[in-house]
Image (cartoon, helix red, strand yellow):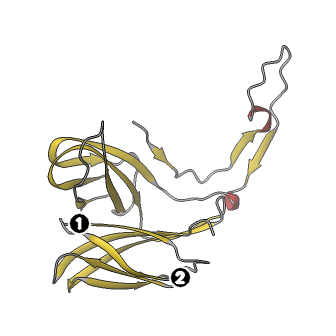
Amino acid sequence: MATFVKDDKNLIAWDQNRYRKIYRYIRKKPVPLNCAGSDISVFTWGGYFVEFDNQTSVTHSFPCCYLTPPAVIATTVSKDSSLSNFNVFVSSATTSQCTFETSGYYTGYVYYQALIDGVYSMPDVGRNLEVKTLAFANTNTYTYTFTTTFTCDPIVTATADQDVNVFITALSKTQVTVEVSQANYNGKVYLQAIEKGC
């Protein structure tokens, strides 16, 4: 299992003599290359996977700490060629854990990303990221206007907090229209939009 956490706001020092494995009899001293905070992304981000074993619900503790409940985007991933055609949704989320549920008894993995709502600039990759929790109230359609500026149509992913299908029906550089498969839906949809390589 792998855990990826990015919440260190300090400088990062790379040893420029360690980019390649060179085994000399006499080794060179490290040559540090300092990266200032303005050159790296600074936010708490959790990426992990959860394993289901013929279950419909799994409660998972986050590998990092959040000040407020994060927006969690999840998807099912096949394990050993198992059937992964299941809806996955986040029925509850707190600052320390969340509960994933599926539309049936599922055996396999659920991969997820967790971020606090907001707009993030990522100078180390030259892209913008926006995270938003949408609150649906007696509707199946929600049009959201981005608060950040994208240079092209972003890649958008979304997950609901109930057992409904979530899909994108319209997308531009300035806004996105999200729909769910249930009429008069009352619930949340967690949304992430990131610039693609363009």
Pinpoint residue 155: horizontal percent, then vertical percent.
48, 69
Q: Position of residue 4 (x, y in %)?
A: 47, 45
Q: Is residue 139 left or right of residue 24?
A: left
At label 2, counting other C-alpha atoms closer than 10 Å, the crowd grade (few under 14, some 14-19, many 20 or more) is some
Packing grade of label 1 (10 A; few <14, some 14-19, many >=20) is many
Which quadrant of the figure has residue 81?
Answer: top left
Q: Amino acid at mark 2?
A: Lys
Q: Name which residue lies at 28% across and 71% down.
A: 166
Q: Position of residue 145 (x, y in %)?
A: 44, 85
In the rendered view, tell whether residue 104 sits above or below residue 148: above
Which picture quadrant has residue 134? bottom left
Asked if residue 29 lies left or right of residue 74, the reply is: right
Q: Which residue is mark 2?
A: 173
Q: Earlier in the sequence, mark 2 or mark 1?
A: 1
Q: Which residue is mark 1?
A: 161
Coordinates of residue 32 in the picture (x, y in percent): 79, 40
Say left or right for 157 vs 18.
left
Residue drawn at the location 19% of the way across and 55% of the way down: 101
Q: Along the line of sight, which residue is nearer the eye, 195 or 113?
A: 195
Front residue (pair 23, 68): 23
Report helix, strand or loop for mark 2. Answer: loop
Report the amino acid beneath label 1.
Asp
Q: Which mark is residue 59?
A: none
Image vertical order of residue 131 relative to residue 125, above or below: below
Tell me which residue sits at (66%, 63%) in the image: 123
